[in-house]
Image (cartoon, rainbow, N blue to C red):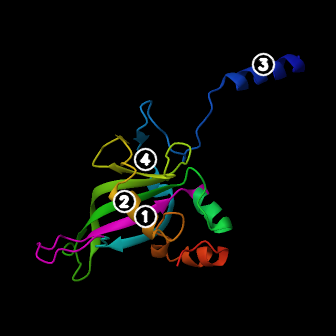
Amino acid sequence: MLKRLLIALSLMWLRMPAQVPPDDPRFTGDGQLMRPDNYREWIYLSSGLGMTYGPIDSAAAPAAERFDNVFVTPLAYKAFLQTGSWPDKTMFALEVRYSATKGSINNGGHYQEGFAGLEIHLKDPERFPTKWAFFEFGGSQRTAKPFPANSSCQTCHAKNGAVDETFVQFYPTLIPVAKAKGTLKP
């Protein structure tokens, strides 16, 4: 009886589809990244206000500054703490939110308001020849194609990323880790 039960359980296990870990990237059949809905449950790294990486046009009307909130998958974060490097399948989420200055009882400073966009930075050398790829999700968009390999995001991160094409230089809790592990670019 026990032998039959073990055989039945073994056969059931063999027939079960492989489960993708909840924070691993998921793709459609045509190679589009599916939006990770749980990114706000990932590890929070940092926020920025009004950050920009290109030239600033002083003649243009000033745009309202936006907040950038950065999250990374928990397993990638744990691996980084141990090695100072990002493992394959690492995903960063850059959540962009509008800023506001007037509301409720606020008399100064900025606070975050509505959702402006979501970008995902994904490391997958098996899928992308440049190792990393960027994806942008606007509004309620559920899937996204990768940016071209020569996109401004890809080029800037490859040139200026402090650790493995990522902007660790803006994540104050990870800078000491990268320094200690010898992975921080000058």
Residue in the picture at 28% in, 70% down: 54
Residue in the picture at 40% in, 50% down: 149
Kindly check if marks 2 and 3 are in contact, taking CB atoms under 8 A apart as contact.
no
Kindly check if marks 3 and 1 are in contact, taking CB atoms under 8 A apart as contact.
no
Kindly check if marks 1 and 2 are in contact, taking CB atoms under 8 A apart as contact.
yes
Residue in the picture at 48% in, 75% down: 169
Question: Badge 1: few (under 14), some or many (20 or more) residues near its Cα, within 10 Å?
Answer: some
User: Mark 3 falls on what kind of element?
Assistant: helix
Disc number for residue 8? 3
User: Mark 1 falls on what kind of element?
Assistant: helix
**Residue 70 covered by magenta stretch:** yes
Query: How far is the residue under mark 4 from the one under mark 2?
Result: 22 Å
Residue in the picture at 36% in, 72% down: 48
- The magenta-colored residue range is 54-75
Q: What residue does disc 4 label?
A: 37
Q: What residue does disc 2 label?
A: 153
In percent of width and height, residue 93 lies at: 43, 57
For discs 3 and 1, the disc positioned in front in the rendered view: 1
Disc number for residue 157? 1
For discs 2 and 3, the disc positioned in front in the rendered view: 2
**Residue 67 covered by magenta stretch:** yes
The quadrant the N terminus occupies is: top right
Question: Badge 3: few (under 14), some or many (20 or more) residues near its Cα, within 10 Å?
Answer: few
For discs 4 and 1, the disc positioned in front in the rendered view: 1
On the rendered structure, is 116 left or right of 23?
A: left
Disc 4 marks a residue whose amino acid type is Asp
Question: Badge 2: few (under 14), some or many (20 or more) residues near its Cα, within 10 Å?
Answer: some
Q: Sequence-wise, which precedes: disc 4 or disc 3? A: 3
Q: Sequence-wise, which precedes: disc 4 or disc 2? A: 4
- The relative height of residue 179 versus residue 18 in the rendered view (above or below) is below
Query: How far is the residue under mark 1 from the one under mark 2?
Result: 6 Å
